[in-house]
Image: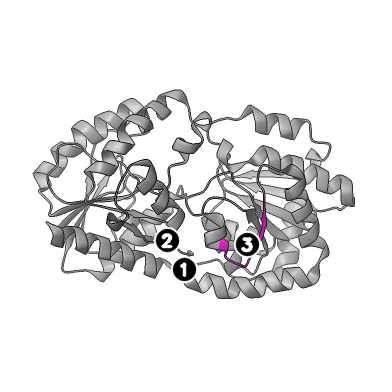
Amino acid sequence: MDIAINTRFLIKDKLEGIGRFTFETIKRMCENHPEHTFYLLFDRMYDTEYVFAQNVKPVIVPFQARHPLLWKFWFHVQLPRVIKKINPDIFISTDGYVPSGISMPIVNVIHDLNFEHNPHHIPSGVLRYYKKYFPLYAAASTRIATVSEFSKQDIASKYNLPTEIIDVVYNGISDGFSPLNEEQKKSIKQNYADGNEYFMYIGSLHPRKNIARLLEAFEQFKQDTDSPIKLLIVGEEMFYSKAIQRAYTNNAYNHDVIFTGRVSDTELALLLGAACALTYVPLFEGFGIPILEAFACDVPVITSNCTSMPEVAGEAALLCDPRDVADISRAMKRITEDDALRTELVNRARIQRDKFSWDKTADLLWQSVIKSYEKN
């Protein structure tokens, strides 16, 4: 087969969420199936790291698609032209967007429908594009892959699609996340938190990530415990939030809050491995990869009791209501004061994490490809 793939999120040193999914799955598919040719479609100059094997043909499709007008131009004008020249047997999109006017089978990965549930978190122009085109993209897909049973049911319900055409492929855990020894933990804590323990959040600073309430919960935790523990927030700002700025500025303990910005994968694994706990309490997630990363590091997890997160965490995390600041704060207090609970969560996580791997994800996505091709 000749397989064309939308890989516009494969950007060197900027793999988050969809980019990470694209890298881990497409790399394995290209390497595992040398009998097929893979055309990887980029919207900018690509890094040679992403030419995964000899059967990969990278193609640059101008221009960088990072704005609703450019999305429309790239997916509805530029990409169809390129695909018609390639004339592949199948098209895969790893980010939910589908080019118009193509006739081959389409496997479309839709990670979640946050914008349908939290439209107030999305800039108006972006929201209009999503609302107009994502139902069309879903309807045009031969098969849809998604990353949790929660998202599968959500997509089927919102877009009136049969569940039979939606495959759950989950996410995996990237290499490099593993437990640290005590000497490593001590060194990291000294470098980043003045030698103190710290909670850690990983992800973009997007409104749905609930950073403002996390900051408020941290303040309440500090007031209740007088603990020296700090809070590290690791990630890149996305869609500037006045609520986050206000929660930080008004926080009596903001001197104990550390914004690191984006860090390398190696640094991220070290920071997480030395954390007292992952405090990851978004309002909405299609999956929640940081939960698995913490599991891999033997770090206890506090996460939300809604959307996909209980499905991913199983019995291995402390769940709380992400809209209830007091509940988040109580979870922080429990996880720092109850050693038996911490040990129990880590032991359960060692079992839960084995259910997920990028090898499994890539295999399941490949099965979606084969089903789509055979249907044609």
Label 1 vs 3, first from the N-terminus: 3
Q: Determine the CA span between mark 1 and mark 3.
A: 21 Å
Residue at 25% x, 33% y: name it.
Answer: 74
Task: Check disc 3 and report the residue beneath it.
Answer: 270
Q: Is residue 148 visible?
A: no
Q: Is residue 344 visible?
A: yes
Q: Residues within 10 Å of mark 3 (few under 14, many from 20)?
A: many
Tell me the tag on residue 356. 1
Q: Determine the CA span between mark 1 and mark 2.
A: 7 Å
Q: Residues within 10 Å of mark 1 (few under 14, many from 20)?
A: some
Q: Disc 1 on helix, strand or loop?
A: loop
Foreground: disc 2 or disc 3: 2
**Amino acid identity at mark 2:** Tyr
Foreground: disc 1 or disc 3: 1
**Does 82 sit left or right of 148 as displayed?**
left
Q: Quadrant of the N terminus?
A: bottom left
Residues rendered magenta in the picture: 313-320
Q: Quadrant of the C terminus?
A: bottom left
Tell me the tag on residue 170. 2
Q: Nearer the viewer, residue 347 or 260?
A: 347
Q: Determine the CA span between mark 2 and mark 3.
A: 25 Å
What is the quadrant of residue 68 in the picture?
Answer: top left
**Amino acid identity at mark 3:** Leu
Percent x, y of residue 75: 25, 36
Label 1 vs 2, first from the N-terminus: 2
Label 2 vs 3, first from the N-terminus: 2
Residue at 43% x, 58% y: name it.
Answer: 149
Q: Nearer the viewer, residue 2 or 220?
A: 220
Q: Nearer the viewer, residue 201 or 134?
A: 134
Tell me the tag on residue 314. none
**Amino acid identity at mark 1:** Phe
